[in-house]
Amino acid sequence: MANSIESSVPITGLDIGSSKIVAVTGYRNEAGKIEIVGLGEAPSEGLENGVIVNIDRTVKGIKEAVKKAELASGSAIKFVNGGIAGPQLKVQQQEISMIRKNWDTPVSREELDQHLESFRYLMMKPGEDIFDVIPQDYCLDRENGIKHPVGICANTLKISYNVIIGKTLAAKNVYRCIRESGLDVVGLFLEPFASAEAVLCDDEKETGVVLVDLGSGTTSIAVYYDGILRHTAILPVGSGSITQAIKEHFSVVKKDAERLKVQFGFAISDTTDKESIITIDGLRGRQQKEIRLQNLTDLIQTRINELIGFIIHEISSSGYDDKLMNGIILTGGGAKLQHLCKLMQLRTHYETHIGTPFEYLAEHYPPELSDPQYSAAIGLLVLGIRQYELEKERAQRIKHTIIELPEKKLTSKKIIEKRKGEEKKRGKDKPGQTFDDLMKQSIEKLSAKFRIWFENDINEVRAANPVEEKPIRVPIHGIGKE
């Protein structure tokens, strides 16, 4: 963001994955790039296929990852931005059309926000909630393809949206785990969107691209065209399913299965030496186990081909399969499997390469962060910083509006009386609305959903752990607002 305000408060992105939990802390420097000051990770033992199944183990992993990030950064972490993933997410297309009352009045940002807000009251199935509403297209007086309608006069307005729906418990459990770790949730964002922010550039989003984030328990797919997220899906299968298949097929423990996949695994079996043998130590003095490399790679290729079939189906379902100039970009820990890009390109006929999360990072960032497994965590950090800056700018605009009182037409006596009345109303110890006051007001407005879920718990924690300054709380991905 060229005109962004430098983030004086370090922000933390927290990626709660199926195999590991990663915490990344950073801030935006004067050049507009993000400086990473802390990185911590810990094993994740409380999730299966992106779904939290054990609160205590998840909390333990969060605490360990955050503690390591705190030691690396040299500062305490209180506020984090979490991610929502899992196979429970789905996309529903909605459209709204209307005849505007004042056709000679330009379309305003507030008018669009009102229509966007109306989607929050759609009837959902029990246990479901709207996680995000993303505008797709605007049509003014039958003119399609308008990307920026603000400021244009029109008689009719039609807006197409993608409504992202998920299980209420998914967000609630993520929130609960973070809160029980002694942290405040600043925002919850969709992980496919977060990974895309860390890896993709604006030109790629504009001309068409598919981002495939291969995690351990899930595979996230995000289709972009014309700068807009057109389709997203989260498959309940990831690189961890390959590890599980190796474990079951060759009767080895999970850690050996993971080592076989990482060290000797190939996505294309024809590239391996058919005569090579891998030796695995037996448990507690038992006989060693020998595995043919050809058999290992045949099994891996079979599982990868199944996953690619699901990815092809999602790309076709998006309706943009013929508009993807930049092909497929792979990221996530599973993207490191040898020859995966080649197999993906052979099966899908799209140009494919691996994407790493360096789009927004400052120079001389830690070399380990160039690993695609950190894409989601860095994306959550980027989105958290961006949201904090937007809310800070809004609060400053409100503050300036309050300061610039229309006192020109008042006499000096009336001005003095007016100010005395305001001072008496506020109290002598409250000289005026500060930025902290405005931030707290915004927090109260934007955290209503979370406050309903855990109102008593939040009040107890805040009373026991008072803080002087708080970043803005935001709903899940800002409910589509930018």
Image (cartoon, helix red, strand yellow):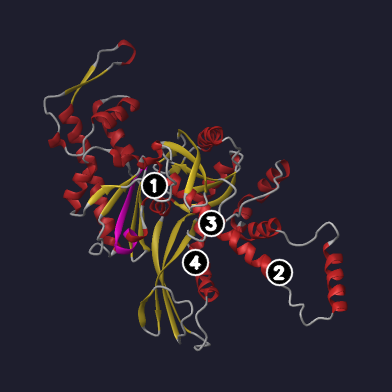
Q: Do residues under tags 1 and 4 come within 8 Å of each other at their CB atoms? A: no
N-term-proximal mark, 3 vs 2: 3
Q: Earlier in the sequence, mark 1 or mark 2?
A: 1
Q: Residue at x 81, y 59 (%)?
A: 430
Q: Which disc, if any, is residue 402? A: 2
Q: Is residue 133 left or right of residue 459?
A: left
Q: Whole-Å distance between the Cαs marked 3 and 2?
A: 23 Å
| Amino acid at the residue labelled 1 | Phe
Q: What residue is disc 3 on?
A: 387
Observer-nearest of 279 and 72: 72
Looking at numbered disc 3 in the image, what kind of residue is underneath it? Gln
Q: Secondary structure at mark 3?
A: helix
CA gap between label 1 and label 4 equals 40 Å
Distance from disc 2 to disc 4, alpha carbons, whole Å, reads 38 Å
Residue 16 in percent (x, y) is at 46, 42
Question: For the residues carrying marks 3 and 1, which lies nearer the camera in this image?
Answer: 1
Q: Which of the two discs, 2 and 4, labels the residue nearer the N terminus? A: 4
Question: What residue sits right under mark 1 in the picture?
Answer: 358
Amino acid identity at mark 4: Met
Which tag, 3 or 1, sits closer to the chain's start?
A: 1
Question: Is residue 209 in the magenta section?
Answer: yes
- Reading the image, the residue beneath label 4 is 123
Q: Judge the density around disc 4: few (<14), some (14-19), many (≥20) Cα neighbours within 10 Å.
A: few
Say what amino acid the circle numbered 2 marks.
Answer: Ile
In the image, is residue 179 above or below residue 102?
above
Is 429 situated left or right of 235 in this image?
right
Question: Do residues under tags 3 and 1 come within 8 Å of each other at their CB atoms?
Answer: no
Label 1 or label 4, whichever comes before in sequence order: 4
Q: Are marks 1 and 2 in contact (CB under 8 Å)?
A: no
Q: Is residue 20 magenta?
A: no
Q: Distance from label 1 to label 2 (Cα)?
A: 40 Å
- Region in magenta: 204-217
